Image: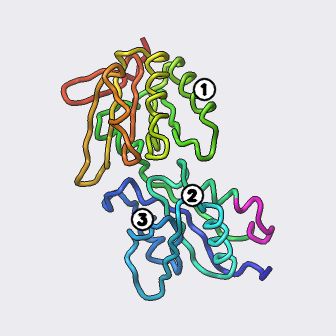
Amino acid sequence: MTPVTSGSLIVAGLGPGDDALITQDVRDAIDQATDIVGYIPYVKRIPARPGLTLHASDNRVELERASHALEMAAAGQHVVVVSSGDPGVFAMASALFEALETGPKAWLDIDIRVLPGITAMLAAAAQIGAPLGHDFAAINLSDNLKPWDLIETRLRAAGEAGFAMAFYNPRSKSRPHQFARALEILREACGPDVLISFARDVSKPTQKILTVTLAEARAEMADMRTMVVVGNRDTRRIGPYVYTPRSVT
């Protein structure tokens, strides 16, 4: 392989959707990039300009995307891999390091940085109030990369331990039944009166927030554009807001 030259690779978070929520560090990295790599909808958010090449790809080729980015950086390009939200939360940073671990040793000499972004979990919580004000767990409900049995185990354990929870990828067209099962487990582990919030299209003009009890929750309230936040037994409403106290009863 050609020795690593003076290229660089940055994995950057574009936030939950509103361009105003992109950090200045990420903006600067994009401005200095020669190549942008990412999932098609995320790359579309990057304006074209002379000297910049956009490399968009499908959502199920994360490792190939990461390897391509590393190859270009090793060849001297200044590459930015873009993710929505924060790149370290169920996103491309982990895929990048997985590709780095199994790739040529020369890739270890690449200048690699990860720039944080505002993840959907925190953007949703801010719109709801402070539902993650105490200990919480973040769980990806997709079983593409882990078995559903493990998801059920983690849901029950987190609920019984009294964690508030934030769920990514709650319900897709290919697995509509699984979120209904997740709600059953949550009712058993947390109780029917615990509050659950559905935050759809957070930070976008189409944003919609709905808070109900677990007894009232229905699977149809969530889709892949929805962030789901479940409180614990201490979580409560105050006016239009939901918050979890910092002290434990």
Tell which tag, 1 or 2, sits nearer the viewer: 1
How much space separates mark 1 and mark 2, taking CA atoms? 25 Å
Give the amino acid type for the residue marked by disc 2 in the picture: Met
Residue placed at 45% from the left, 69% from the top?
A: 43
Picture layout, residue 28 above or below residue 85: below
Q: Is residue 122 left or right of residue 205?
A: right
Residue 144 is a magenta residue: no
**Who comes first in sequence, dot 2 or dot 3?**
3
Residue 106 numbered tag: none
| Residue drawn at x 77%, y 82% as measured from the top left | 2
Q: Within the magenta stretch, is there residue 103?
A: yes
- Which SS does the magenta portion mostly show? helix
Q: Earlier in the sequence, mark 1 or mark 2?
A: 2
Identified by mark 3, the residue type is Pro
Q: Residues within 10 Å of mark 1 (few under 14, many from 20)?
A: few
- Please report the bounds of the magenta region as a residue range: 99-108
Where is residue 40 drawn, in percent x and y?
A: 46, 67
- Marking on residue 92: 2
Quadrant (top left, top right, bottom left, bottom right) of the N terminus: bottom right
In the picture, measured across the screen, residue 130 lies left or right of residue 33, that is left
Label at residue 41: 3
Q: Tag 1: residue type? A: Thr
Q: Label 3, secondary structure: give it.
A: helix
